[in-house]
Amino acid sequence: MSNYTENIKNKAKVAKQYEESNNLSQRISLHEKYSTNPYGLSNWLFDQYSFSDGDNILELGCGTGGQWKGRIPENAKLVLTDFSEGMIKEVKGKYKEHSNIIARKADIQNISFEDSHFDIAIANFMLYHVPDLERALAEVVRVLKPGGKFYTATCGNNHLIEVNRWFNEYNPEYDIFNSSKLSFTLQNGVEQLKRYFTDVQMKEYADALEINDVDDLVNYILTFNDMVNIGKNELSDIREHLITKQNKDGIIHLSKQIGIFIAKKTSIEICKNW
Ligand SMILES: C[S@@+](CC[C@H](N)C(=O)[O-])C[C@H]1O[C@@H](n2cnc3c(N)ncnc32)[C@H](O)[C@@H]1O
């Protein structure tokens, strides 16, 4: 039986999961197709970001870099990083026309930039994959300028909670998709960020999934199979179990709980007063 909680931050498994962009792209597509909030997560995230002209912006664990599409701040310099070579290749291709964007391979636990270089750092839906979270947060603080902002979106304990419950009904030994066991969540994030940042705020984005094709959900679950290890023989039984969760209109409802933390690196002036 797989240990989801450990696998989700196991370096080799995470690297395999994100070797190429296909798993992530498939998951993003499911959210785009079935999310009930029409506003859109990327639009909402950009409402939270506050950029100024000339900002140096660093994104860590950028994945496919999709959030910037159609929203590139023209008067800023953007460094998009990810520890996956496959993701960086895709991002380079996507933004090759933009001279203010650099895509570079980097592990958040060891960021190859000098101290106090960036005005803004962003790390969305990735801190729970990092084996040494303390080291990652210390690195983010190091590369931010005093007063610089850190934005980090993540999931809450109730994110896709039904999937965890249904797997558990199917087989009590399955404790997968248990967001409450992630190392960085909307519930445990404030405490961890406060060790490194000041003015930590959290904002939630209201959303849910209403899925009308069970196979889309099965395929979504399978994108995590490096981490959850569902046996091939079990798949059709799991599919049958998920069908029993459809409502009279054939819809499977899943809760989402996502949000963002906005945190600030202490400014030098404040440090001097200590
Ligand atoms: C769930 S995806 C999120 C991608 C993107 N931030 C988004 O919101 O769509 C997690 C990303 O973090 C990257 N990642 C995981 N661990 C990392 C690490 N230690 N350093 C840098 N990137 C990492 C993965 O390669 C993957 O692209």
Image (cartoon, helix red, strand yellow):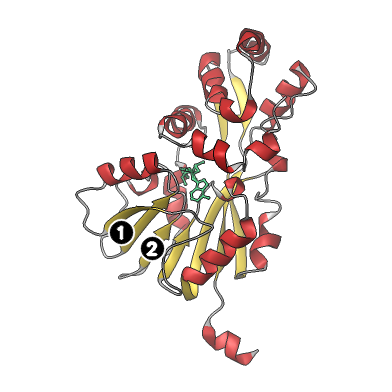
Cβ–Cβ under 8 Å for marks 2 and 1: yes
Residue occupied by mark 1: 73
Residue 18 image label: none
Residue shown at the point (62%, 39%) measured from the top left? 8
Q: Is residue 109 left or right of residue 79?
A: right
Q: Is 212 situated above or below 108?
A: above
Residue 219 on image: x %, y %: 52, 20
In front of the other: 84 or 240: 84
In front of the other: 36 or 189: 189
- Name which of mark 2 and mark 1 comes first in the sequence: 2
Q: Secondary structure at mark 2?
A: strand
For label 2, count other residues whose C-alpha is less than 10 Å away and answer few (under 14), some (14-19) or many (20+): many
Q: Work out which quarter of the rendered image holds the N terminus and state it.
A: top right
Mark 1 Cβ and ligand 1 under 8 Å apart? no
Q: Secondary structure at mark 1?
A: loop
Q: Is 218 situated above or below 199?
A: above
Residue occupied by mark 2: 57
Residue shown at the point (66%, 67%) measured from the top left? 194
Mark 2 vs mark 1, CA separation in Å: 10 Å
Q: Amino acid at mark 2?
A: Ile
Q: Is residue 91 left or right of residue 224?
A: left
Residue 47 on image: x %, y %: 44, 55
Residue shown at the point (71%, 54%) measured from the top left? 188
Q: Amino acid at mark 1?
A: Pro
Residue 211 visible:
no
Residue shown at the point (57%, 59%) measured from the top left? 136
Residue 245 on image: x %, y %: 67, 16
Quadrant in the picture for residue 4? top right
